[in-house]
Image (cartoon, rainbow, N blue to C red):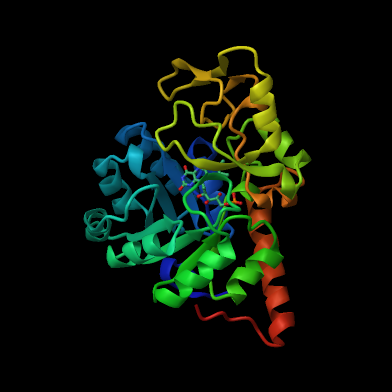
Amino acid sequence: MLSTRFTRLVGCSAPIQLAGMGRVLTAELAAAVSEAGGLGMVTDTGAGASALEAKLKAIRERTALPFGVNFLIPLLDRDCVRLAAGRAKVCDFFWGEPDRTLVDLVHSAGALASWQVGSLREALAARDAGCDFIIAQGIEAGGHIRGKIGVLALLSEVLDAVDIPVLAAGGIGSGRSLAAVLAAGAAGARVGTRFIATSESAAHPSYIAALIAARSEDSIRSTLHSVDCPLCPSTHGVLASAVEAARRLDTETAGELQLVDGTTRSILKFAGFRPDRTTRGTIEAMALYAGQSVGWVREVTPAAEVVRELAERAEQLLQTWLGEPATPTR
Ligand SMILES: Cc1cc2nc3c(=O)[nH]c(=O)nc-3n(C[C@H](O)[C@H](O)[C@H](O)COP(=O)(O)O)c2cc1C
């Protein structure tokens, strides 16, 4: 078992947090990651309190273990934060200035607060806002990229500056890269792309197939899939093939998505929307977010196998490198 400050703080047994990933995440995926020893997560997609309540209930029906809820600041509803903080172990925030009033709200309802950051300045602000742990996101990441530097450079800066546990995010898709960030002093890793190709994920099968076919270098930094996205303009880690396919589209829309209430909405060309199972249209031209970790996406497996593979391999490597049982302290 890889015990770290993160696993002890949140009460899990593997130093792996499922990344917030919007509609790609399901209650089944969150529960499977938690049951396998990691910290399962769902994202509040801004669909309102009753949709969130249903997700929280669905997770609790599947696991009694800790899980977290991810919030994107541009879509934030404080009532949903209050609701999540009363049910989840962790409320996690991304894409906005760290905010002490939000952290206090989470703490007053009994949960831990975490913030995914892209710079040392933002990490210090998250610490000063009272966060219990932070996630340092490097530019290797899939999806929206907050900062400008690689994960090891950012991790080194942040670990030298703060005392709270720090997870690393971006490009971590193998046991070796998990071991590397733990050896650098991280308390764990936030992993996104590896969990898209799991049996519990809601990603569209063609999206998953494109990830399996891709190599690490097929994940590029792009600003193009920014249409109709409340977080944009921004840089994303996305498959090069998706950008090329969108450029080739000779229509203004790439397809349509189904909303929670059953109605449909058009997905514009270059929209920042990653396709899920309900999406119809030219899937290969949509925002197929992928981090540099995509090279390790080789088949669809249950999420528990991803957790096990990463944690066991990292533990083995750390033991080999250190010549003793691995117990990273921070
Ligand atoms: C498909 C996808 C969707 C994402 N959506 C979100 C999100 O809704 N909220 C969030 O905090 N981060 C989101 N991210 C970024 C992740 O939190 C994390 O930084 C990233 O997945 C780490 O890199 P990796 O994909 O190489 O593991 C997303 C990433 C991907 C790949």
In this view, 220 is above or below 4: above
Q: In percent of the image, x 69 and y 48: which residue is there?
A: 294
x, y percent for residue 6: 47, 69
Q: In percent of the image, x 54 and y 31: which residue is there?
A: 225
x, y percent for residue 269: 56, 21
Residue extending farthest to the top is: 251
Left or right: 134 in relation to 207: left
Q: Quadrant of the N terminus?
A: bottom right
x, y percent for residue 296: 73, 52
Q: Nearer the viewer, residue 61 or 69?
A: 69
- In this figure, what is the number of numbered marks? 0
Left or right: 104 in relation to 136: left
Residue 198 seen: no
x, y percent for residue 104: 23, 59
Q: Nearer the viewer, residue 247 or 129?
A: 247
Query: Which quarter of the figure has residue 274?
Result: top right
Q: Nearer the viewer, residue 136 or 110?
A: 136
In this view, 250 is above or below 276: above
Q: Nearer the viewer, residue 305 or 20?
A: 20
Residue extending farthest to the bottom is: 324
Left or right: 100 in relation to 256: left
Query: Which quarter of the figure has residue 71?
Result: top left
Residue 44 seen: yes
In this view, 194 is above or below 224: below
